[in-house]
Every structure is written in C-alpha cells, then in structure tokens.
Amino acid sequence: MSENALKILTPEFISGISGMELRARLIVEGFLIGMHRSPYHGFSVEFAEHRQYFPGDDISNIDWKVYGRSDRLYIKQYEEETNLKAYILLDASKSMGFKRSGSLSKLEYSTYLAAGLIYLMMKQQDATGLAIYDESVRRFFEPHLTYSYMKLLLTELSELQPDNKTSTASALSTLAERIKRRGLIIVISDFLDDTKSVITALRHFRHRKNEVIAFHVMDDSELNLDFPADAVFADMETGERISTEVPALKSAYKRSVDNFIRDLKRKCFENDIDYSLLSTSTPFDKALSAYLTRRKKMF
C-alpha cells in the first residue's frame, strides 16, 4: 500500500479533517488507492460512477470517452444494481466515550468508520440504514439509496454524543425484531456486556438469514492497561471510582481482557459471524476489507 494511502487511512489524519462527508470520502479513496498494491486487490467494488486514474490501474478500464471530453484520465466503474440492504448498528453508550489524552475516543473512531462504510456501500448501490443505541435504541433509519439520505446519516454521525449505560444485547434483540428483510448487519461496539447475551442477540440476525459483521472497537490502553503506576479509574457509566497500583494488576488484567476477546471471537466464529478487533489507532482499511470479504460471500 502506498505511503499516501496509509496516511489517509490513519485515524489521526482523518480526525484532522473537517466535515464528516469529506472524512468518509477520504477513507474510501485511500482504501481504493491502496487496494492496487495490497492483498485486497481483486475485490469487486462496483461504483456507478468514475474515479481518477492512478498509476498502476488497469488501463483497460480507462473511459476514453470521458478522456476525449475532459482531457483527463478516469477509470470506468462497473454499474451493478443490487438488492442488498445494509444496516450499521452503532453503540453510543457512555463507555464508548472513553479516550486517552491526545487520542480519538472509541465513539469518534466508530463514527468515522461508520461514515466510511456508509459512503462505500452507497457508492456500490447498496441501500444503507443506521441505528444508534445505548441501553435502548436511540435512533433508527431504514435503508435508502440517495445522496441526500447519505448526507442525513453522516450528519447524524457528526452530531453523535455518548450517553447512558450499555445494553448491547437488549438493543440488538430489539433491532433484530425491527429488521425484517435479509441483508448485511454491521455492529460497531466495545461489546462491554455479557458475552453470552450479546451472542444470543447476534444469532437472532443469523436466524433471519442476515450476514453479520462485528467490529469490536477498543482503546489501546484498555487492551494493554497502559496507565501511570498509580491511577484512579472511574466507571464511565456509573461514576464509581477506584484507586489502584497498575503494575500489580497488569498481568491479571491482560489475561482477563485476552480471555474476553478470545471468547467473543470464538463464539462469533461458531455462529458464522465475522469478527474484527479494532483499536482506536487501527487504520480503516482493515475494517473496509472485512466488509468487502463478507459482502463478496453474499453474491
């Protein structure tokens, strides 16, 4: 992947861009540039429009008619209408507001990821919807496929703030009853809930023949307990505080987190649910490639 594409795909770069639509476009364009020199080459990304030619592109896809009119090289995208309905289900509970100094919060990272996915899916002619939840479903948008609707969803993401306690299992069960038509379900959460209950809720979508991707978003310091030796921890949802010596807890904490992640990943695998662990420093190409992998299985 080129250096420029890698830079565009980093959360730090995207966070410095103003406007959710521009962030989404840059995430997708950076990903598409990188696909030509990455393991993702060969994926089908069908857009109903053109994009600028980049060195290394297959010249057989150049639209010479456009070149004749504009004297610029553009790649012809493949028009393929699909009946895919896609839903992004985003956890916006208070725990998602966690962040280290100078980093993105889990919710900020997740909104940028969701924006990139919405932009990519709609460009592929996939009708896309959005649900925001915490301990209950806060907002629900049915899938549609228009530019104005995409802007509505991106505006919703740009204004999103973390609130309330987490109840991923309960919210997902509610959404499984509301989503009637088979499609692609993308859940973005830190999954800080009872794993058994979360998997039961995700299985509801599978029982209805939906394809499911679980993006597990965590902060690096949550994964590794990278805090000062003496730290005070506060529960984001209850406000409860506890003082502790980090070195004394680090080994046991790391085992507990690793077991949590391993258990969630294994149970997702057992139920044919794609699982992807993302830290708030993970470039966005990992998530977009996971989406394309699952989408490819549907056609």
Image (spheres, rainbow, N blue to C red):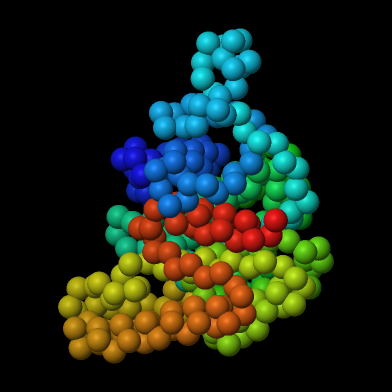
- Residue 101 at x, y = what percent? 29, 59
Outermost residue, front direction? Answer: 60
Dividing the picture into quadrants, the one containing residue 7 is top left
Against 116, is 223 above or below?
A: below
Instruction: Say left or right for 181 vs 276.
Output: right
Q: In this view, does 244 lie to the left or right of 138?
A: left
220 left or right of 129 in image: left
Determine the residue positioned at 49% across, 78% down: 265
At x 60%, y 22%, the residue is 63
Q: Which residue lies furthest to the right in this view?
A: 180
Give percent across and percent down for residue 59. Answer: 51, 27
Vertical arrangement, residue 86 with respect to residue 245, above or below: above
Q: In this view, does 49 lie above or below 182?
A: above
In the depicted view, which residue is nearer to us: 72 or 277? 72
* Nearer-the-camera pick, 86 or 221: 86
Residue 252 vs 150, above or below: the answer is: below
The N terminus: image quadrant: top left
**Picture coordinates of residue 48 (x, y %)?**
67, 34
